[in-house]
Image (spheres, rainbow, N blue to C red):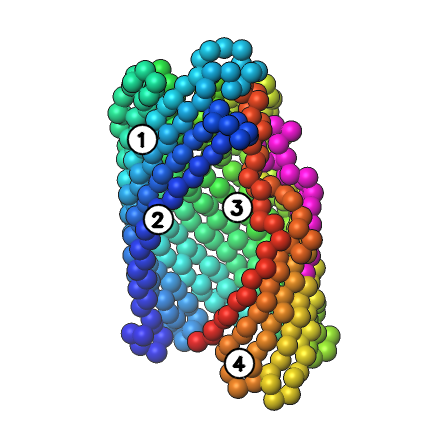
Amino acid sequence: DLSDSIALKSTTAYRDLDSYIQVAGDGTPYAGNQAQSYATSKQFSQELELSGSMLDGNVNFVAGLYYFNENATAVRYGKSYEGTYAVTGVVSDARSQNEFYTLRAESIAAYGQAGVKVAPGLEFVLGARINRDFKRYSAKLVRAETNTVTNPLTYAEDNWTSFTPRVGVNYKVSDDVFLFASYAKGFKSGGFGTPLTGGAGIPSYDPETLTTYETGLKSSWFDNKLTFNLAGFYSDYKGVQITIITQPNSFRTTQNGGDAEIYGFDMDLEAAPFPGLLLNASLGYNHARFTNVSPGAVAASAANGLVHSAGTPLPYVPDWSASVGAQYAFDLGGLGSLTPRIDYAFKSKAVLTLADPSTFQDKYGLWNAKLSFVPEGNRNVEFSLVMNNVFDKTYYYYRNISRTTGNNLGQAADPRLFYAQLRFKY
């Protein structure tokens, strides 16, 4: 703390990641198609943040500087044998290809936001962030069976500068009801995709931007025994970055898929009708659809025998989501408290691969359970037994069906998971 009303915070982070992934793409016990990927990433970030209040608490502010640096490498070895994919009917499906990638990324940002109380209960909020991103990427593809450099070592680099403002207004109707509305812009830098065969070089994609309008209320009733929150939103999404599957080589790469709009609402309710019992429920609607589609995305979908057009849902975004939960804290006297909890979460159907109606996750629901113990002598310690996905529901994070090779690949989510958890509060 620099004073009673101003504080300075420094956050330093370092992350070192090494990963290895092996995939049997043919889906059989035989070595018809195999791929191994090795990746490393070293990340460093530093943030300085100044926050505080002034003018007798009528102005609250936060301002800061942020720096991020990453150096990453990736190597992928892939091999398939002639005839592995009978649907191709060509000898060219026999190949052995090695891929080598490096990435250097750097980001520098300055940001600030202030809330100014202009009348009893009324506050205006103004903020902004200036960001500069830099990326340098290299790639090399080698056909190992012929020792042919399909794509020689190629470099690409670019930088992007963004200014993202935020404007809001908050109004405290009473001690129990709070209204808000805001306008904000978001930005995600561009980058580079997987190079294709034939010396085409490294493809790039542009930044994506999001302009969001939100309004809602937060409220509590009956001496805080009941809380109800509601928010509605609309977002204009430009240059949506999507992952596509290229043909005939089935590479995954990133490009701008077009523009989209997102609108919907979120509401949640929490009730504590009497001591020990807590009930909660939530409901959300999220309409996320492309409004226009880039020619590149149309061509990529057509190569897979698919149609990508305006009105196509954004991947991984279900229209509806809902949850309910209940818990009760039993007083064990001098021993502490024991709290069993159960909750249920529902998600409606969602597309998993862009514009492919056969690769979707149907609607599903998950039950979770938890039993927590808090000792009487130390309320800052909690020991829990947790079971997620109680009924072992099978569902997927990712699916892809290749129209060229006939591959039907998927990444299943966690099955029933049981674990113990120890939590400390300090």
Q: Mark 3–mark 1 contact, CB under 8 Å?
A: no
User: Which quadrant does the N terminus fall into?
Assistant: bottom left
Quickly name the residue at label 2.
17
Mark 4 or 3, nearer chain start? 3
Q: Which mark is residue 100?
A: 1
The amino acid at mark 1 is: Phe
Mark 4 or 1, nearer chain start? 1
The amino acid at mark 4 is: Arg
Q: Residue furthest front?
A: 30
Q: Residue furthest right?
A: 273
Report the residue at 53% width, 31% height from top: 29
Characterize the local packing of mark 2: few (<14), some (14-19) or many (20 or more) Cα atoms within 10 angstroms.
few
In the rendered view, does 174 fall on the left or right side of 72? Answer: right
Mark 3 or 1, nearer chain start? 1
In this view, 176 is above or below 82: below
Quickly name the residue at label 4.
379
Report the residue at 37% width, 50% height from top: 129
Distance, label 4 to label 1, CA atoms, is 52 Å
**Residue 318, x across and y down, in percent:** 64, 42
Which residues make up the magenta segment?
343-365
The amino acid at mark 2 is: Leu
Distance, label 3 to label 1, CA atoms, is 38 Å
In this view, 420 is above or below 241: below
Quickly name the residue at label 3.
212
The residue mark sitting in front, 4 or 3, is 4
**Residue 53, x across and y down, in percent:** 39, 71
Instruction: Indicate whether residue 344 is drawn in magenta.
Output: yes
**Residue 212, x across and y down, in percent:** 53, 46
